[in-house]
Image (tube, grey):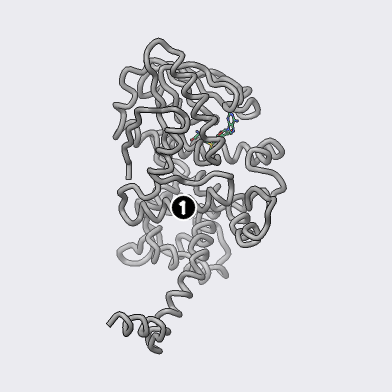
Amino acid sequence: MEHQAEAKLLSPTRRELLQASIELTNHTLSYIKSMALRCAVQLGVADAIHRCGGQVSLDGLLATLSLSPSKLPYLRHVMRVLTASGVFAQADGGGYRLTPVSMLLLSDTGDDGGCRSLLQLVQLKLSPFCVSPATKLAEWFTTKDEETPFAMTFGTDWWGLCGRDPGFGVFFNGAMACDSRFLMDEVIHEKGDVFDGVTSMVDVAGGTDGAAKSVAAAFPHIKCTVLDFPQVINGIPAAGQVEFAAGDMMDFIPQADALLLKFVLHDWNDEDCVNILKRCKEAICSREQKGKLIIIDVVVGSPSQATCHEAKILFDLLISTLTPGWERDEKEWSGLFKEAGFRETTSSHLC
Ligand SMILES: C[S@@+](CC[C@H](N)C(=O)[O-])C[C@H]1O[C@@H](n2cnc3c(N)ncnc32)[C@H](O)[C@@H]1O
């Protein structure tokens, strides 16, 4: 029986091969979905539908976007791909409407200061800074010296490009701040008890306008400090309980009851992660009371819905093309904590 099953696998029927060829076409053209999304983001389709009251015909969309009538069939094709993938939906009586996915692409989400928009993050992920390195993946596998496909593409690492090209730095920091507004809203709502008993917190490598701001707004008694490179935070005025400290986390991290590392460790290899974790341990253990290190990052393979698992493994491969880091599974995380000397750890999952 086993032998027969194997033989069948090796000799697919004509019908199976035809089906396989269709699947292969879909895998091969997956990037067209991303590019249709990029096109919609650049044209501002979600905002246009929103401006039209949440529903618009194809002609109405063309007019709202101020596009030439000759582009109408092409706009229909872009919208057909994006409605088939659930980014937009077909409206009753024709035309298009927003879905929860495209609501995240609105540039202004109303009274919440844009905390439910992921537009800037999507713009970054669909930009040549993230897309071009992925086209060099196979070339990178066959080289010895280049650290990442990103460095191969841009001649410097991610932080080097942020320093060399201030426009890129602003673009990147804006995207991370957008991620923080969205995610911290969820973290504070779902896991806010992690901040119980905390009176001071350092957001290590916290960027420009990120997690610390959300924590300070939700817990006004917590004095928050953001540590990041001088070129990232110099010039940002202290706001409320959030202060900024310029420095290199590899060398020194200011003391606090709690430290936060949000989407930092996934940028680094194991050796650098252990170094960062050791610096964190020094900063919380030099206090009289035992401190707390809060890490917000991806755990590959943790109990997840299929959509969440797919997002994690795709994000992992993206991060691996951009930085020397990757997304870790539970065992890899435990190994890092042990190596850095942390004994008590607990984990909790959002998805
Ligand atoms: C992926 S971003 C995460 C930013 C922020 N934690 C967030 O989630 O929005 C990584 C951050 O690490 C900062 N960074 C990288 N190397 C650093 C270093 N050696 N010392 C301090 N900050 C550093 C970058 O400037 C950037 O703001």
Is the C-beta of the residue carrying label 1 under 8 Å from the nearest atom of ligand 1? no
Q: Residue furthest left?
A: 1
Q: Is residue 331 above or below residue 6?
A: above
Is residue 182 rendered to the left or right of residue 75? left
Residue displayed at 38% across by 15% down: 199
Residue 71, image x, y percentages: 56, 68
Residue 147, image x, y percentages: 65, 48
The one nearer the camera, 309 or 81, is 309
**Disc 1 residue type?**
Ala
The one nearer the camera, 204 or 42, is 204
The one nearer the camera, 84 or 4, is 4
Residue corresponding to mark 1: 48
Residue displayed at 36% across by 24% down: 218
Residue 108, image x, y percentages: 45, 41
Residue displayed at 37% across by 51% down: 53
Is residue 223 rendered to the left or right of residue 325? left
